[in-house]
Image: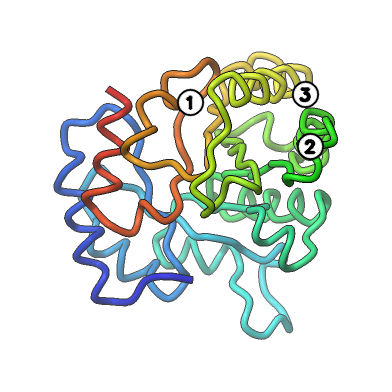
Amino acid sequence: MNGLGADLDEARAIAAGVGGVAARVALCAPATLVERMSRALAGTHVLVGGEDCHAAASGAFTGDVSAEMLADAGARLVIVGHSERRAGYGETDAVVAAKAQAALRAGLEPIVCVGETLEQRKAGAALPVVEAQVRGSLPAELAATPFAVAYEPVWAIGTGLTPSTVEIEEVHRAIRAVLVDMFGAHGKATPILYGGSVKPTNAGEILHAAEVGGALVGGASLKAKDFLGIIEGMG
């Protein structure tokens, strides 16, 4: 829940700084900014996405935003299952899977988030928790379309804490195994993003870890300088 019209200047600065970058770059904006950001970034290398969507295409869901509404506003992607939605709104794997299906219905590319809490990691349950979330949150329809999985350890989001490279690689390898089991060759090629206190100072190490195919950036994406510093870490 960050971003006003004045912040579109940061989005424009990001777009101006990624012209020669090979990586795909997207900004997932709050619903109030999706259309304006889509217009502001038209013709640039930066895609625009939404931060969440409702599973239904329309109906009596006052205040919610459907995937069709996001697509109509110019979005190309949407994040579903973010840990803040799971924790704060009680979203289950089934709800997340339904939202991913909604994204596909509207022609959006879903970024499906998974991740364990600190208590689960301390209990040694990180891998089974994440593996179960992947299986429960990815609908079978994803086998025929591009999507991404984002691993975001809940305890690392906004805390400044970051798992070690070894811990990140362990979880990403486990996610990859599930993806291959579920989707075969498509699962082998699906990008697995890392999210959780990614910043310019640690992006290079994280982005070069095994099975890390990109980053889901939170607070550092609000400022062009910080976000561009992370993108440079992909080089």
Residue at (52% x, 54% y) in the render:
158
Q: Residues within 10 Å of mark 1 (few under 14, many from 20)?
A: many
Q: Amino acid at mark 2?
A: Lys
Dot 1 corresponds to which residue?
213
Which-is-in-front pick, marks 3 and 1?
1
Which-is-in-front pick, marks 2 and 1?
2
Q: Which is more N-terminal, label 1 or label 3?
A: 3
Label 1 residue SS: loop
Query: What whole-number distance in Å separates the C-alpha atoms at marks 2 and 3?
Result: 28 Å
Q: Give x and y (percent) for residue 172.
A: 63, 24
Q: Residues within 10 Å of mark 3 (few under 14, many from 20)?
A: some
Residue at (58% x, 32% y) in the render:
163
Q: Quadrant of residue 203?
A: top left
Q: Give x and y (percent) for residue 92.
A: 82, 55
Dot 2 corresponds to which residue?
122
Q: Which is more N-terminal, label 1 or label 2?
A: 2
Residue at (64% x, 41% y) in the render:
153
Label 3 residue SS: helix
- Residue 136, compared with residue 4, is above or below; it is above
Label 2 residue SS: helix
Query: What whole-number distance in Å separates the C-alpha atoms at marks 2 and 1?
Result: 26 Å
Dot 3 corresponds to which residue?
182
Q: Give x and y (percent) for residue 113.
A: 64, 45
Q: Which is more N-terminal, label 3 or label 2?
A: 2
User: Nearest the camera: 208 or 19?
Assistant: 208
Which-is-in-front pick, marks 2 and 3?
2
- Residue 44, compared with residue 58, is above or below; it is above
Q: Residues within 10 Å of mark 2 (few under 14, many from 20)?
A: few
Label pair 2/3, CB-CB below 8 angstroms: no
Q: Amino acid at mark 3?
A: Met
